[in-house]
Image: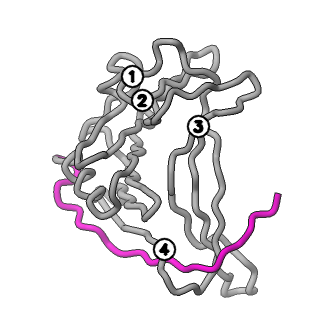
Amino acid sequence: MTPTLKPTSWEVSPVDRQDLPGQWKNWVVRQAGLLGDAWLLAFSLEGAAWGRIKAKSLSLAHNSFPNRVLNLDQSNLQEMYVFSASGQVHAWIADGQWKAVLIQDKAAPQGDWFDQEILLWGTHCPTDGWMDQFALLEEGLQGMRQAVPMDNQPAITANRKNVPRLKVRVYLGQSPQNGAAVVAATRLVALIG
């Protein structure tokens, strides 16, 4: 299916990196102050982990499922996305130092964009897999797991209907070499499920 393009443009601005990595939880909550209630998707060398920021409080999936999902700490963080419908703060390590930017839509349309939904892996949520508004998703014979912040326990069907999805905004630009449309930027928008 061809996406429907909408006119918009985006702006990217640097973000204060103070508190990274030592006080990274405080930093995440401060970024949500720019965006309102938000989700956290963080990556370490061991894998990915989820969190949710509501009312200036950070809840991590590991706190709900301590022995079943990855625990993040300052020694293993590599990259983080704090995102909501109003924007995304992206932080990552490059050349041994943390970098961070905020990407938001601008009001004056100057380009095109579309949203797409990406299925998260997880074929089922076990009966004991719903706690503190986190849904434990499992998949495969290896028992791969992730705990995703969800307002309701997902009722995933055999044909993968109702699998939680990540909404991603894709901004289009124009190639300076040949004028062809190219993906100029992307940002996470919402967790749906």
Q: Nearer the viewer, residue 155 or 184?
A: 155
Q: Residue at x 38, y 46 (%)?
A: 40
Residue at the image position 24 percent from the left and 41 percent from the top:
74
Amino acid type, label 4: Asp
Mark 2 or mark 4: name the one nearer the start of the chain.
Answer: 4
Start and end of the magenta stretch?
1-22
Describe the element under mark 3 as helix, strand or loop. loop
Task: Describe the element under mark 2 as helix, strand or loop.
Answer: strand
Q: Amino acid at mark 1?
A: Met
Say whether disc 2 or disc 3 marks the residue closer to the N-terminus. Answer: 2
Residue 86 lies in quadrant: bottom left
* Up/down of 161 relative to 106, above or below: above
User: Is residue 14 magenta-colored?
Assistant: yes
Callout 2, which amino acid? Phe
Dot label at residue 105: 4
Who comes first in sequence, dot 4 or dot 1? Answer: 4
Label 1 crowd (10 A; few <14 / some 14-19 / many >=20):
some
Going from N to C along the chain, the mark reached first, 4 or 3, is 4
Point out residue 39 in the picture as x, y percentages from the top left corner. Answer: 40, 47
Please name the residue that numbered disc 1 is placed on: 131
Q: Are marks 2 and 1 in contact (CB under 8 Å)?
A: yes
Look at mark 3 in the image and give the residue it sits on.
164
Q: Are marks 2 and 4 in contact (CB under 8 Å)?
A: no
Marks 1/3: CA distance?
16 Å
As shown in the figure, which amino acid type bears the numbered disc 3?
Pro
Looking at the rendered image, the quarter that the N terminus falls into is bottom right
Pointer 4 with pointer 1, Cβ within 8 A: no
Q: Tell me the quarter of the picture where residue 192 sits.
A: top right
**Residue plotted at (75% across, 64% down):** 3
